[in-house]
Image: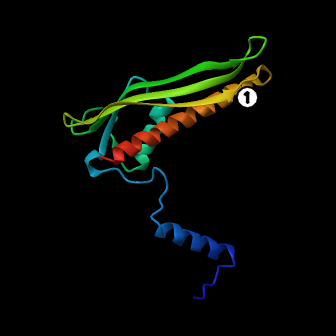
Amino acid sequence: MNVRLPTSLPQLSLALCALLAGCGFHLEGGGPLPHSIALVRIETADTESDFYFGLRKALLAAGTQLDENGHDDTATVIHVLNDSVAQRILTVSALNVPTEYELSYAVKFSVTSNGRELIPAEAHTLVRDYAFSENQLLAKEREQRILSTALANDLVTVVMRRLASL
């Protein structure tokens, strides 16, 4: 068998795309949600959290309509029961100054539709740790915010996978 390998970048890109398409590859979170949850309402106490914004964005990207006003009784309801970020000290220096923190993001949610419980309340927590230095205080505060957003986005992916499994 004589196989000719692509020699230019466009040919190589096309060959790679064909290979990935042939194996069933698709982007994470790119799958559509079931038609039974075409209209969704998010019930949460905190509409300013990273998780809420990420979930809202992911639902819209999946082609779901959002019931912002809560007037439609046929909407599938995602109840966000807990959405919290916590930070704790992992290590301290000899001078009793924190040198490493652990950041955890916890979400507890359930899903109902037409009075039926589709997903019972389940909790998910993700944890990351990061080094801390007083000399780089502003940079470390920014790193903490970036990690918090990344953890929230990872939790959104978990919830979207659960919704796609319905």
Could you say where residue 154 lies in the image, as x and y percent from the top left? 51, 39
Q: What element carries label 1?
A: helix
Could you say where residue 137 lies in the image, as x and y percent from the top left? 74, 22
* CA neighbours of label 1 inside 10 A, class few (<14), some (14 to 19), many (20+): few
Identify the residue shown where x is 63% and y is 29%. Answer: 129
**Residue sitting farthest toward the left:** 115
Image mark count: 1
**Residue sitting farthest toward the top:** 96
Could you say where residue 22 lies in the image, as x and y percent from the top left? 47, 70
Q: Which of 100 and 164 is in front in this view?
A: 100
Does residue 148 sit above or below 66 in this rendering? above
- In the rendered structure, the answer to whether residue 63 lies left or right of residue 116 reads right
* Amino acid type, mark 1: Ala
- In the rendered structure, the answer to whether residue 102 lies left or right of residue 43 reads right
Occupied quadrant, residue 162:
top left
Could you tell me if residue 144 is visible in this image? yes
Position of the N terminus by quadrant: bottom right
Could you say where residue 96 lies in the image, as x and y percent from the top left? 74, 11
Does residue 122 sit above or below 166 in this rendering? above
Residue hosting label 1: 139
